[in-house]
Image (tube, rainbow, N blue to C red):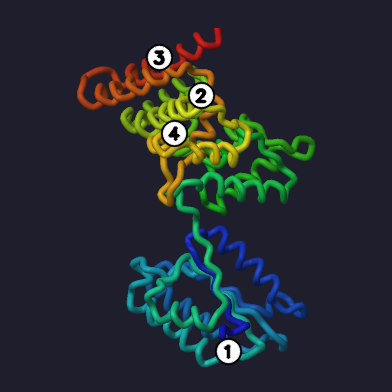
Amino acid sequence: MPANNIYVIYGTDDGACAEAALKLFNKLKPAVGDDFANDIIDGNADNAEHAHDISHETIQALQTLPFFGGGKVVWLKRATFMGSDRTSEAERAKLGVEAIKDTLSAGIGDDCTFILSATGIDKRRSFYKWVKNNATLQEHNKLDTSKDGWQEQVGVMVQKRARELDLNFTSEAMELFVMLAGEDTRQIKVEINKLDLFLGKDRRTVELDDIRQMVPLSRAGLVFEVGRAVQRRDGVRALELIDQQLDRGESAIAILRASLIPTIRNLFMARAAGENMKLPMHNYNAFSDALNRLPEMDRAWLPQKKAGGVNAYPLFLAAKDAQAFPYPALKKSMESCLQADHSLVSSGLDHRMVLHRLVVELMSTAQQRRR
C-alpha cells in the first residue's frame, strides 16, 4: 500500500508537472509556521556530481527534524537526473538516486512529507519500481502531436485556461493559437497570460489579429498560417508568408509538402465528400458521424485514424471554405500540386515562381466562383 507521505510527480509535460507539484506543496505544507519550516531543493543538475550532491542534500533534509517542531515538507523540485539521459546514466547520479530510495524505504517518519517532481523517471530502474509500489504517483505527459485529434485536446486545455481568466477566443483565433502554442502546458499558460494583459479589462474576446500580434510565429505556425490563408482565399497573405519563409532559407519543397499539399488535399476531400450528401458544417460530432456513416467504398479514400474511422477533424476545418471552390478546380489543383512537386525536384524553374503559380491558380478559381 502506498505511503501517505511520499508523492512523485513526473512526465514530459514540464509545465503541468510544476503546476501540480506546487499545488500539492501548498496543500500539504504545515499551516503553522512559515516556509522556513520546509525544504525546497532545486533538482536541476548541471552534471552527475551535481546530481549526487543534490541527492545528498535531499537526504539531509529528510533526516533533519522540523526547525520549529511539528511537521514539514521536503520538495525535490524538478529533478533532471532520474531519466535516461547522459547525466542520469552516470554512476554518481545513479548512486545518489539509490541513496534517496534507501532513505525513503528506511522510513522518514509521519511528521515529514516528501514530494518529488521530475522531468522524467527511467521506469527500468529500481527507484521507479520502489516508488510505484510505495508512493502516490502522478504522470503528466505532453500530447502526442503525431496522433489524430491532438488539436481538439489542446483546444480543450486552452479553453479551460481562458475561462479561469474570463477570456473567450473566436474560432479563428483558437485555431491559430493551438498551432502556435502547441502541446506544451507551460507555453500555453505563458501565452494566455500575455493575451490577458494585452487585452486589459475592457476587452475579453481574443481575435485573430491579437494572436498574430502577441504569439510568436513558430515554424509549425508558419506552415499552418500559409495553409489557412489558402483555405480562406487570402492569396495576398499566403504569398506574403511563402516569401517570408523562402527569405529565411526554408525549402520550397518543405513549404509545398508540409502546407500547400495538405491544405489543397483537405479542401478537395471535403468538397468531394459533400458532393453526394449534405454535411453538417457547424457541428464537429455531427460532421464526423456523417462521414463515418458513408458506405465503406465512399469513405475508404478519406484520411483514416490509426485506431480506425475517418480522421474528420482536418476535413471539418476545411469543409466550409471548400464550398467556395468549384470541385473541378480543386481536382485540377491536386494535379497541379503533383506537377509543382516534380518541378521543384527535377527542373531548374525558380522555386518562388512555382509556389506562387500554384497559389494564384487556386485563388483565381475561387474568385470566378464568387463573381
Residue placed under numbered mark 4 in the picture: 223
Count the numbered circles shown. Answer: 4
The tag earlier along the polypeptide, 1 or 3, is: 1
Residue placed under numbered mark 3 in the picture: 361
Q: Nearer the viewer, residue 128 or 244?
A: 128
For residue 108, the mark is: 1
For residue 322, the mark is: 2
Q: Mark 1, mark 3: which one is toward the viewer?
A: 3
Q: Judging from the image, what secondary structure is the residue with disc 3 in?
A: helix
Instruction: Identify the residue at horizontal 53%, vertical 29% (top origin).
Output: 319
Q: Is residue 262 left or right of residue 116?
A: left
> Where the C terminus falls, by quadrant?
top right
Q: Judging from the image, what secondary structure is the residue with disc 4 in?
A: helix
| CA distance separating discs 2 and 3 | 15 Å
Instruction: Identify the residue at horizontal 31%, vertical 30% (top origin).
Output: 253
Q: Judging from the image, what secondary structure is the residue with disc 2 in?
A: helix
| CA distance separating discs 4 and 1 | 53 Å
The tag earlier along the polypeptide, 4 or 2, is: 4
Residue 285 falls in which quadrant of the image? top right
User: How far across and down, in percent of the image, does residue 298 sit?
Assistant: 42, 33
